[in-house]
Amino acid sequence: MKRIYPIFLLLVFIFFGCTQKNKFNTTISSSEDSLSSYLLIANDFNLPRKKREQFNQKAFSIIIDQPNDSLNKVNLFKVANRYYNMDNWADFKKTVDIILEKANGNKDTVSKAKAFTYLGDFYVSQGVSDSAFLYYFKAEKIFLQRNDIKNLARTRLNKAILLFNEGDFLGSEIAVFNALRVVKGEKANVIVYESYNHLGLIHNELGNYDRAIEYNSKALNSIDEKVMPAVFQSKATSLNNMGYVYQNMNRHDKALGYFKEGLLQNNLITDKPFVYAMLLDNLAYSKFKTGDYSGLPELFYQSLEIRESLQLTSGIIVTKMRLSEYFASKRDSVKSLQYVKEALNESLSSKNYRSVLIALKRLTIIEPQNASNYTKQYIHINDSLQTAERKMGDKFTRIEYETDQIKDENTDLVTQNRNLVFLFTALGVLGLFIFVIKTQKAKNRELLFKQQQQSANAEIYNLMISQQNTIETGRIEEKKRVARELHDGVLGRMFGVRMNLDGLNGFQDELAVNQRTNYLSELRNIEQDIREISHDLNREKSELINNFVAIVDGLFEEQKKTHKSKLISIVDSGIIWEAVSNSVKINLYRILQESLQNINKYAQANIIRVEFKKSEDHLILKMSDDGIGFNVKTAKKGIGLQNILFRTNECDGVVDIKSKKGEGTIITVTLPIE
């Protein structure tokens, strides 16, 4: 009896203690009145949130007065975790700030890096993506410095998820690969699985469905049930993701198998109710799309009920959008409109603007009479969303390049960076010095070339002036000769005929008639002489005017004598060569000379055609041949074509070169003239 009595008292004590706990009394037994008990009760999800917060606050009150050592910070992290699970973001942030202050006080970089990841999680929950990215980046730097492989990979994966949620899929993919690169060869199956899983989501969003299937398959194959607890329901998650890819490919018959297999996983609704709700919703949608209405819309309702109980806003929006589509197919426009408007309101209240766009697009179909209004809203929100995504991407890039946490933590690295700056500065100055020298040499070569070109042009100009003077001298002498011929020959003969005709005016006999006939014949001879002199003068004027043409003709004659190719030349008679400047004539002559030389050396042409023609206020030189042709892009680097381009540019003209191997060449030079 003595032994039974104490046991009986103990059982009574335990019974009443449990009864009071079930009634959520604020008091606990003296045996539970300890830090570990408070933390344990604060993490009991069966208790109301307010009760859990009270015990977590009691645990915090005990921890805050303890010495600042590693155990103290571990316990503070436990308190922060519990606030995180309660969605008590204010106390969560307050606790993490205290941890960060303590970590800075005793230079505990491990706790500091972990605190940064917690702050990143906090700003993710608040929708402040740039601050979240900053703290993840700071944590990443410390983990990299300490070679903390798993935490580094986990932080990079958090960055990838953040970038994905902000619509930066390329940046997210890079961050995932950086995480995988860190854990390569390490036993980190959870990180490998989550990385491949995330890559599948990225490529699904990008529409790269084959790559998405590949990565989801890798995620499935990386599941190790010995390492990854069954409560994570990794297989169910991957099966849902795989089915979702096929759903986006409109292969709903294939998707159904994955959704059904996912729902068969043990304890899924208990372990991961949100995954269970996703699978139900996707299964219902694929059944609907395949025309199998069995179990519909009950499956949608079941998924919606779970998502509403878990307050999964994004999932609620998806289910309601699908219900709207389902009832539209049933011609129940009232329910269809009801669900899409509920989805729109949910999207607006949660600032899920991507879902807003989908809802607006759906409303344009259901209510065509208001389509223009919905379309305007859609365009406005879409433009704002794209602008916001670009700004956020710029912020992320700026954070990565401006944050230098390692410099603040390691003075030796600062010295190394300074030495590197000196080295690169010296190399930069040396490179700049070499660049200046090379640039100066190039400028000198260009100046020398221009001087030589100007000298050659001046020499050609002087030769042409000299030739023009010679022609002008001959012209004056010819004028004097014609004057003498007219004065001494024609005028004298005309005077004699006139006098004789005057003398015969009084006679009408046969002899006088014959003499007058002879004198008239003489007048006709004089007329012919004058005509010949006039023709000679006109020919002289033409030769003087077309002096440039004569020079070009000389070049053509030399070409015909020296080479076998047949040369056809056409000069537009409408060109007023006196109006063309000497510099243009010189450059035209040199371009023609260079072109003929290139044809003779390389083209192997049978026929060469050269044409000068006038088009409004432009002079056009067109040279063509039926030779072997060449690659224009490669040939433009040659000296010959460079000279043609240079001379054309000197005259403010343009060059058009058309050539293909085996199809000959056409070079058209167009120069402006007044």
Image (spheres, rainbow, N blue to C red):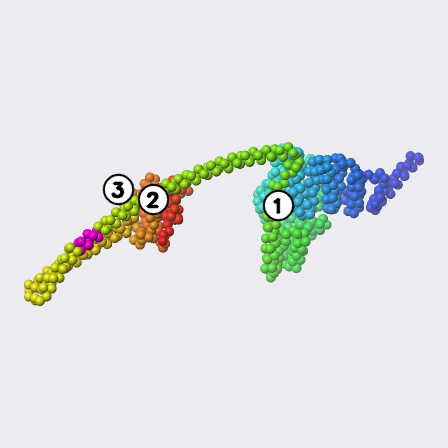
Task: Tell me which corner region of the image, top left, top right, bottom left or bottom right, holds residue 398.
Answer: top right
Picture layout, residue 479 above or below residue 163: below
> Which residue is at 48% across, 38% downward?
436
- Mark 1 lies on a secondary structure that is helix
Picture layout, residue 511 above or below residue 620: below
Q: Choose between 566 and 266: the one closer to the eye.
A: 566
Q: Choose between 583 and 661: the one closer to the eye.
A: 583
Q: Give the residue pinned by disc 3.
A: 561
Q: Main secondary structure of the magenta part?
A: helix
- Mark 3 lies on a secondary structure that is helix
User: From the image, which quarter does the N terminus lie in?
Assistant: top right
Amino acid carrying label 2: it is Ala
Amino acid carrying label 1: it is Lys
Q: Upstream in the sequence, badge 1 or badge 2? A: 1
Task: Tell me which corner region of the image, top left, top right, bottom left or bottom right, holds residue 524.
Answer: bottom left
Q: Upstream in the sequence, badge 3 or badge 1? A: 1
Q: Residue furthest right?
A: 1
Q: Are marks 2 and 3 in contact (CB under 8 Å)?
A: no
Q: Upstream in the sequence, badge 2 or badge 3? A: 2
Q: Choose between 116 and 456: the one closer to the eye.
A: 456
Q: Are marks 3 and 1 in contact (CB under 8 Å)?
A: no
Label 1 environment density (alpha carbons within 10 Å; few <14, some 14–19, many ≥20): some
**Residue 183 forms part of the magenta stretch:** no
Query: In the image, residue 505 lies at what x, y percent?
Result: 10, 66
**Residue 480 forms part of the magenta stretch:** yes
Label 2 environment density (alpha carbons within 10 Å; few <14, some 14–19, many ≥20): some
Picture layout, residue 484 above or below residue 265: below
Q: Which residues are magenta?
A: 478-486
Q: What numbered label is drawn on residue 395?
A: 1
Q: What numbered label is drawn on residue 458?
A: 2
